[in-house]
Image (cartoon, rainbow, N blue to C red):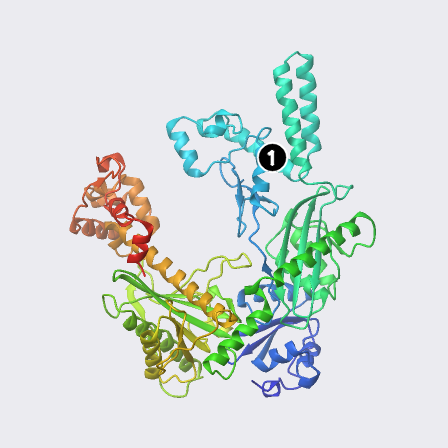
Amino acid sequence: MADPSSYRPRPGEIPDSPGVYRFRDEHRRVIYVGKAKSLRQRLANYFQDLANLHPRTRTMVTTAASVEWTVVSTEVEALQLEYSWIKEYDPRFNVKYRDDKSYPYLAVTMNEEFPRVQVMRGQKKKGVRYFGPYGHAWAIRDTVDLLLRVFPVRTCSAGVFKNAARTGRPCLLGYIDKCSAPCVERITPEDHRELADEFCDFMAGRTGTYLRRLERQMGEAAEDMEYERAARLRDDIGALRKAMEKSAVVLADATDADLIAVAEDELEAAVQIFHVRGGRVRGQRGWVTDKVEEITTGALVEHALQQLYGEESGDAVPKEVLVPALPDPVEPVQQWLTDRRGSGVSLRIPQRGDKKALMETVQRNAQQALVLHKTKRASDLTTRSRALEEIAEALGLDSAPLRIECYDISHLQGDDVVASMVVFEDGLARKSEYRRFQIKGFRGQDDVRSMHEVITRRFRRYLAEKERTGEWADGVDGTETGDDPRPVDGGAPRPVDEPYAAEPGADGRALTDGPALKDDDGRPKRFAYPPQLVVVDGGQPQVAAAQRALDELGIDDIAVCGLAKRLEEVWVPREDDPVVLPRTSEGLYLLQRVRDEAHRFAITYQRTKRAKRFRAGPLDDVPGLGETRKQALIKHFGSVKKLRSATIDQICEVPGIGRKTAETVAVALAGAAPAAPAVNTATGEIMDDEDGAPETTADALGESVSAGTPDERRGQER
């Protein structure tokens, strides 16, 4: 615990101007980012008597070891920079909203030649129009099914589209007139795009035009005694009206607005957003956060606005945003929203009428979301704290292990031996810091030896980082970083201890922590932040191996334990008997979640490596040849067999392939033995390469690997 006076800036050093400040801990990680109209006045509030500070603020300033700031011209610039840094550094003491689910959107891919209507989740893509978010994917599909009668836009995947174009036969939707079948050229690209534009206009709330047009056409068809056509138009009108009824009118003046409500208690806050377009509720979403800093409702609203509109522009930012409390000051936030939209945005609190009534509905939803969130064990702050305290008590630790790392070994009968490292901070998974390892010190199956190698490599990296940053006084050999000297695609050496491109977290974002993030600027460093507890998946032998690795490196301030699967016993080093936690213990539940996550991550990586090995072809061994140029070669020649018989001059004709690369490809293919013919395992037929079968035995190998029952395959894997 640091004394804030030890890093307090000298009087007069802090400028009296707008800016953004960062607090860093002893490991140079940014732990808090804030903005201020006056940096001098704001920072002075942090360096007063600790007894006068809010408990959470007191924890932050005593965890920090330094503070720095950046001066900007206006408060709007400070707001933008604060948002960028919070997103970049992910500070532990800042408010971070967690999406309570990954909401689905109705998306129209206007960036394709033939736009496609589909359900999308996750990060938004450029050139795609989004509508929503919706509470459930089935709600989108029901709406689309009704609208396809009137707007028969393509909904099929790229594979189905190409197959239909190749065979000249549309899919079922094309036969029942719920798709205009651009795959078989029933409609031109221009007319199909116009159809997609009309679909988007209807979803955006401009419904009256199409209803009036259909009603006029129905009347004309009836007058001309075209009763079948009139009946179809009548059904189309009914379908549109039914789709409109799914989102009831809540604001009679066809308002476009977002309504944001906040429900909070001392520890947590829940935010709910209703998206109203054309007077109808078109989407709903919500976030939950731990209040790790002293913060007002207006500040919570400001953070919600940053997350909601930080990546948006144009019409995605509505003309009106209704909130329960205004940020202080409100002018910079309103100007920031206006800049993102490109026109004026009204940010205000509803006072009366329909908008106030709707805000009360949103507020009730926020309150219910907070109550529901607190019932979830894994996300309950009190439950997590109790679990960490139970682990500390059972293992005899001085304090609760706020950072836990767990390691697991995975292989298939001794082949493709890999290991995983997962990280839990404050009882929650921190997927941006997951790591995976390839075991290269030896071959074969030896979990104990593998565990020793992984722990050694991970903490040798940690010691090297400490030495480089000056935190480590004694000399440590920092040159052995575990990097594979062999370049990938002619580039820089590839790390063996690979950073994990994380799955979408609870906030819907895909987090990464690769070498591009420079530790000198406070970004999370690879292997540089030590845990308080190391958990290994296994019993006494694995625990002893992990402890031996730490002892050899001279590390004595990190606890080690292991969780054995059979009886869920907790093993500690140099003890003959395990620690037995009660089956209802929150600490045991947390250790099980950590262990199971490490096992899942390890076996997923092992299966990925195995599949990649089976799919490997002769071009994979050509140095300096990346995936893009490999695909270009195959596309140009049609197969590896034809490529092998090509001359160097013919290979040079492929775009992006120079003579030196062509010579390398020719030499590599000349030295590689031709692959055995692929076999269709369903018919026993030998598939010739001329028929489009890949010149590799990957398909056959894939069939042999997948043979057997699922239980038999799981028994071979670890």
* Residue 435, position as x, y percentages in the image: 40, 66
Asked if residue 305 can be seen in this view, the reply is: no
Residue highlighted by disc 1: 199
* x then y, percent, for residue 173: 49, 29
Q: Quadrant of the N terminus?
A: bottom right
Residue reaching furthest to the right: 352
Q: Which image quarter holds the C terminus?
A: bottom left
Query: On the picture, is 329 further left or further right than 151?
Result: right
- Do we see residue 428 in this rendering? yes
Closest to the observer, 130 or 652: 130
Q: Amino acid at mark 1?
A: Phe
Count all numbered tags in the image, as a single digit.
Answer: 1
Other-residue count near label 1 (Cα within 10 Å), few / some / many at <14 / 14–19 / ≥20: many
Could you tell me residue 449's position as x and y percent?
A: 28, 73
Which SS class for mark 1? helix
Residue furthest toward the top? Answer: 225
Q: Nearer the viewer, residue 363 or 27?
A: 363
In this view of the protein, which residue sits in the foreground, 269 or 219?
Answer: 269
The part of the image, by quadrant, that contains residue 140 is top right
Q: Residue 452: x and y, percent?
A: 31, 75
Residue 219 in the image: above or below residue 572:
above
Seen at 51% across and 25% down, the residue is 176
Q: Is residue 432 left or right of residue 440?
A: right
